[in-house]
Image: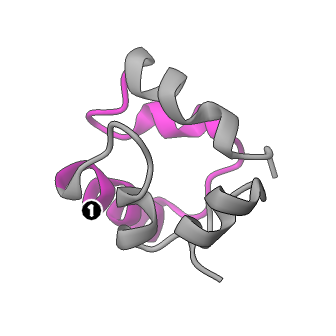
Amino acid sequence: MGAEEKLLLGIPLDLNRMSQSDWECLPGLGPGTAKKLVEYRQINGDFASVADLKRVPGMGAARMKLIRSYFADP
């Protein structure tokens, strides 16, 4: 099941299983930021928590506020 379906059902998303297209389903994230998130995870390993997303260029406070509620911290 993809992120879009999980969002509709209210199922929390997994930071470490999301594809670029999954990231793009979230509000405020376009293809560029989605690609950076996937690349960051590939280079640096899994995200330990939602707060780790702030390390990715382009993930500022405003974007974090928009998407934080869609995740359950691992």
Looking at the rendering, the stretch of residues picked out in magenta corresponds to 32-60
Work out whether 18 lies above or below 62: below
Q: Residue furthest bottom?
A: 1
Left or right of residue 49: residue 35: left
Q: Kindly state the secondary structure of the residue where label 1 is placed.
A: helix
Of 42 and 8, which appears nearest the observer? 8
Residue 61 position (above or below residue 54): above
Please indicate whether residue 19 sits to the left or right of residue 49 in the image: left
Could you tell me which residue is drawn at 43 percent across and 16 percent down?
61
Can you identify the residue that label 1 sits on?
35
Q: Residue at x 36, y 69 (%)?
A: 20
User: Percent position (x, y) of residue 68?
Assistant: 62, 33
Quarter that holds the N terminus: bottom right
Whole-percent x and y of residue 10?
76, 53
Who's the residue at 65% across and 59% down the image?
A: 8
Let me know if residue 59 is in the magenta part.
yes
From this viewpoint, is residue 14 visible?
Answer: no
**Quarter assignment of residue 57:** top left
Is 71 within the magenta? no
Question: x, y (%) of residue 27?
Answer: 40, 40
